[in-house]
Amino acid sequence: MKAKLTFLLAIFSATLFAQTANDTIIFNPLGHYYYTGINLNSVYSPLIDRMGRPYVYTASEEVGMVTFSIGNQNQPVPVDTITPAMLNNEYASFLAQDSNYLFIATGVFQTSGQRAGLSIYDITNPLQPVLVDHWDSAAFTHGAAQVLLQGNYAYLAAMNDGVIILDISNKQDIRFVSNIVPTTNPNMLSGCHARGLYLSHDTLLVAYDGGGLRVISVVNKYNPVQIGAYLNTNASANFNRPYYNHVWRIGDQAFVALDYRGFEVDDVSNPANITTTTWNNVWNNSALGDWNGSDGHANEIAWAAPTANVLMMSGGDSQVLAIDPTNPAQGRIMGEWGVPNLDSLGSWGVDVFGNLVAIGILKTPAPFYSDSGGLQLLSWNLVLGIHEDQLQTGTLDIFPNPVSESCTIELPPSADRSFTIEVVNVMGQIIKTQTANPKMDGRTSQVDLSGIATGVYTIRVTGENLIYSERVVKE
């Protein structure tokens, strides 16, 4: 067993750190679902099913928890809703999954008044979720912004009420364990809210909104203790300081979403002496008042491992950005999707699984304008060794489409290159590979799909400094 584990770790490490300073992430839009009419509802946090099934779950606050079918990724469709009435009259705010159990953080966190809570549903059949248990308490009335799972415990980021620890060892009987409200110092003004969480062994990082970053020891779950506090004063001035919305830790480095101030990377190896490794002021906002109207607002972070060592960060009006964590001091953005001020859509949450990205679209009048809520799906690819502006991209001509046996693709324009042709399933797995040489084979190539299951696939053609792709439906 030990030898097998060592082998797996070696593969995982090789996957994570193969990137170079010129590697690029390319996003391609798939389907979307926008609420229309009078029900312009927000989707806060999406979660792609971790069992590999074609579903995305969404925490949609006043709508509840909505399940989308993505069997056709070009056309996500809502197929089930767990309403607030089924969540003890609380809104759905964040999601986590453990095998066939879905954990729903409940309680709107934008204003006070709703109880922080947690619902557990059995999603063995995603179309017929079954309530296992629900917990909430009138002692905590500021909602829950995130739920984080580790072993027998769940952690709720409960805004003004700090962090709540729950015992979920018996999923039919959620038990309260403890609560800790981090200190408000260092903090330049009010606005300390537990927003985002990351747990590494028994060390909990808390993105504390206007309060900065907190480090909590949870060795003793019944007596959690704060062991570190930090606020980047270089990104702060007067009434405009960074809002620490979410955090993800890789090694000793914590990557933190700073709302309209971009993101920073902090060295947390010594919780009593945290230092900033780098700060990337993505939208070049000054300290003089750019929160309302900024070209971006960072909220959630998701890690694309083991597919690649990439962090995906929601960007509000900028929608989603890909961050390279291999050299923390660079704070390099590898790619982005969503151009500010060119549409009226903005993101709040983001999730990544395989080569699929799900974005929660927010309905909001401020701090950026987004006139409809919903769900957006993207595919993404890691392209090695070139800058994005050097990359040639495009779509393929495929016929017939839908296809029952084989299809013909028209190769990208080139006289002297060989291409790799890949068939990729909805979870980003490459299930078929072949090569084509236009000089020898001509301008088209046949792709045999007769041996694969019905569904939606991507045919991807890559060559030197280019990537072309298109969706195909296998009948």
Image: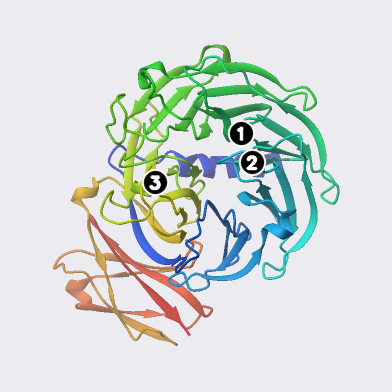
Circles 2 and 3: CB atoms closer than 8 Å: no
Residue highlighted by disc 3? 316
Residue found at x 36% / y 50%: 369
Q: How is the image coloured?
A: rainbow
Quadrant of residue 314 within the rendered picture:
top left
Q: Which mark is residue 144?
A: 2
Residue 74 percent coordinates (x, y): 42, 71
**Looking at the image, is mark 1 or mark 2 earlier in the sequence?**
2
Quadrant of residue 145 within the rendered picture:
top right
Q: CA distance from mark 1 to mark 2?
A: 7 Å
Q: Nearer the viewer, mark 3 or mark 1?
A: 1
Residue 192 percent coordinates (x, y): 55, 26
Is the residue marked by circle 1 packed among few (<14), some (14-19), or many (20+) residues within 10 Å? many
Circles 1 and 2: CB atoms closer than 8 Å: yes
Element at badge 1?
loop
Residue highlighted by disc 1? 159
Task: Using the image as rendered, state which of residue 236 and residue 51 is in the foreground.
Answer: 236
Element at badge 2?
loop
Q: Quadrant of the N terminus?
A: top right
Q: CA distance from mark 3 to mark 1?
A: 20 Å
Residue 8 percent coordinates (x, y): 59, 45
Q: Is residue 2 left or right of residue 441?
A: right
The amino acid pointed to by label 1 is: Met
**Looking at the image, is mark 2 or mark 3 earlier in the sequence?**
2
The amino acid pointed to by label 3 is: Gly
The amino acid pointed to by label 2 is: Ala
